């Protein structure tokens, strides 16, 4: 892991950009150490430096956590292939037209999850080797990736997921194997994700400790107080 820049923010959080092989990422650490680690994975396609994601990461770090985000293959600063661009365009067109998107979604998002999980596990190895960062580890963000990581990575102790109805079939089946505490955030009027699918997915999770928070509003309208509630959720399981 090579750090390429750093700055101390007004709230005392240290923000550092890094590269790990071809993987670009950002690490936010609080002034206190050691700090539990939260992996914060954005939804497919969003860069890790997107302002609302950075704001969430900074606030979470201010609560006393080390927070890390990386760009998934074909996302953010990572190069996109012509096939990636075409798949994204086909997905957007189908959703805007109200056409079925399941097969497009499967062919695009399924492989992306399979590519992203090994990169996150490699990043986790490197992060836990740094001074001032320790376990246990939490995960917050993209639902499909979070399910796969919670099943594949025994160091994940709790997950907070932003509910999306479109989750690959493989991850819908794997949800039954998730046994760590879960906080599931659902936007009731999400224009891009079927509500009932999200509710069915919540029901499928195998953990005995799962909580659903539903708020009115569209896909990007998650209330800011959910960041505070997320801090309390992770505080119960990581500190």
Image (cartoon, rainbow, N blue to C red):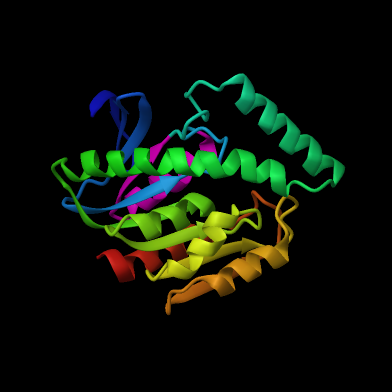
189 and 106: which one is in front? 106
Q: Going by the picture, which residue comes out furthest to the right?
A: 97
Residue at the image position 55 percent from the left and 36 percent from the top: 46
Q: How many marks?
A: 0
Residue 129: x and y in percent read 16, 42
Residue 165: x and y in percent read 66, 58
Q: Is residue 48 left or right of residue 191?
A: left
**Do we see residue 150 in this rendering?**
yes
Residue at the image position 21 percent from the left and 56 percent from the top: 135
Residue 189: x and y in percent read 74, 59
Q: Quadrant of the N terminus?
A: top left
Whether 91 is drawn above or below 30: the answer is above
Tell me the quarter of the picture where residue 82 sits: top right
Whether 39 is drawn above or below 16: the answer is below
Residue 140: x and y in percent read 43, 54
Q: Quadrant of the C terminus?
A: bottom left
8 and 109: which one is in front? 109
2 and 120: which one is in front? 120
Q: Is residue 54 left or right of residue 121?
A: right
As for residue 53 lying within the magenta part, the answer is yes
Residue at the image position 70 percent from the left and 45 percent from the top: 103
Which contiguous range is marked in magenta?
50-70
Q: Going by the picture, which residue comes out furthest to the left?
A: 131
Residue at the image position 48 percent from the left and 70 percent from the top: 176
As for residue 79 lying within the magenta part, the answer is no
**Do we see residue 12 in this rendering?**
no
Whether 132 is drawn above or below 205: the answer is above
Q: Going by the picture, which residue comes out furthest to the bottom?
A: 208
């Amino acid at each position: 892991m090579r750090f390429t820049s750093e700055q101390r923010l007004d709230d005392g959080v240290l923000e550092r950009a890094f590269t790990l092989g071809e993987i670009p990422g950002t690490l936010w650490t609080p002034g206190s150490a050691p700090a539990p680690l939260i992996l914060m994975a954005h939804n497919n396609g969003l860069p890790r430096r997107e302002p609302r994601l950075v704001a969430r990461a900074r606030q979470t770090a201010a609560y006393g956590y080390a927070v890390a985000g990386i760009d998934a293959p074909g996302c953010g600063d990572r190069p996109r292939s012509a096939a990636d661009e075409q798949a994204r365009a086909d997905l957007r067109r189908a959703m805007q037209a109200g056409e079925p998107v399941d097969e497009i979604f499967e062919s695009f998002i399924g492989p992306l999850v399979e590519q992203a999980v090994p990169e996150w596990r490699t990043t986790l190895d490197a992060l836990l080797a740094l001074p001032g960062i320790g376990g246990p580890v939490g995960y917050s963000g993209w639902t499909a990736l979070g399910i796969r990581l919670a099943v594949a990575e025994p160091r994940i102790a709790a997950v907070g997921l932003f509910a999306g109805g479109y989750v690959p079939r493989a991850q819908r089946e794997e949800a039954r194997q998730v046994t760590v505490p879960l906080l599931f955030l659902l936007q009731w009027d999400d224009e891009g994700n079927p509500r009932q699918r999200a509710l069915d997915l919540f029901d499928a999770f195998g953990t005995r400790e799962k909580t659903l928070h539903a708020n009115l509003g569209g896909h990007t309208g998650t209330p800011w107080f959910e960041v505070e509630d997320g801090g309390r959720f992770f505080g119960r399981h990581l500190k």
